[in-house]
């Protein structure tokens, strides 16, 4: 992220101008300064959001790859254990009934995993820093259509 360049007469953010400086400035200069400050603020907010998305995206991508590998390994284990259980049950009952029992067990496992996944998905934090920063932008910058008179 680059730091915006400032002209020599520019006040640091948060430092209010002195009354003499305001009196000596034209309305156009004051509006230019406000516009520049708003533009800089918006650019910085967008850059913060981009950086935060990149950072969280990298973490999510790495985790997704690792979960994918673990999922494939788990799938292979589950497949062969299911076949073994099916073959074991086939020795004491009809083959079709043994397959149905294994399928019902997997349906129950899938339902539990879906429920757990849904709960975890609800806890995704999103862009916390960006949201906090945007909330601090003064109310004057937020649109209030009910108060606009034309």
Image: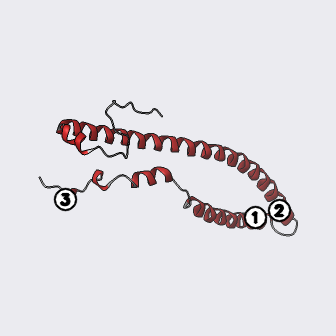
What SS does tag 2 mark?
helix
Q: Nearer the viewer, residue 76 or 22?
A: 22
For mark 2, what is the residue? 85
Of the two numbered discs 3 and 1 on the same chain, state the one appearing first in sequence: 1
Q: Position of residue 60 (x, y in %)?
A: 60, 47
* Quarter of the view holding residue 109: bottom right
Q: Position of residue 118 (x, y in %)?
A: 58, 62
* Quarter of the view holding residue 136: bottom left
For image coordinates 38% across by 30% down, the residue present is 5
Mark 3: few, some, or many residues within 10 Å (few <14, many ≥20)?
A: few
The reply to whether discs 1 and 2 touch (Cβ–Cβ < 8 Å) is: yes
Residue 40 higher or lower than 74, as above or below = above
Task: Find the distance from the CA under tag 3 to the CA under tag 1.
Answer: 65 Å
Of the two numbered discs 1 and 2 on the same chain, state the one appearing first in sequence: 2
Mark 2: few, some, or many residues within 10 Å (few <14, many ≥20)?
A: some
Of the two numbered discs 3 and 2 on the same chain, state the one appearing first in sequence: 2
Q: Position of residue 89 (x, y in %)?
A: 84, 66
For mark 1, what is the residue? 102
For image coordinates 65% across by 47% down, the residue present is 63
What SS does tag 1 mark?
helix
């Amino acid at each position: 992220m680059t730091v915006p360049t400032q002209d020599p007469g520019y006040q640091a953010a948060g430092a209010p101008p002195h009354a003499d400086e305001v009196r000596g400035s034209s309305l156009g200069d004051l509006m230019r300064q406000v516009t520049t400050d708003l533009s800089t603020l918006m650019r910085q907010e967008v850059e913060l959001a981009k950086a935060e998305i990149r950072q969280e995206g990298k973490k999510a991508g790495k985790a997704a790859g690792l979960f994918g590998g673990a999922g494939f390994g788990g799938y292979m284990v589950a497949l062969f254990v299911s076949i073994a259980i099916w073959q074991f049950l086939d020795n004491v009952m009809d083959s079709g009934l043994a397959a149905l029992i294994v399928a019902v067990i997997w349906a129950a496992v899938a339902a539990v995993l879906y429920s757990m996944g849904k709960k975890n998905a609800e806890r995704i934090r999103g862009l916390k820093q960006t949201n906090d920063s945007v909330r601090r932008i003064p109310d004057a910058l937020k649109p209030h259509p009910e108060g606009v008179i034309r």
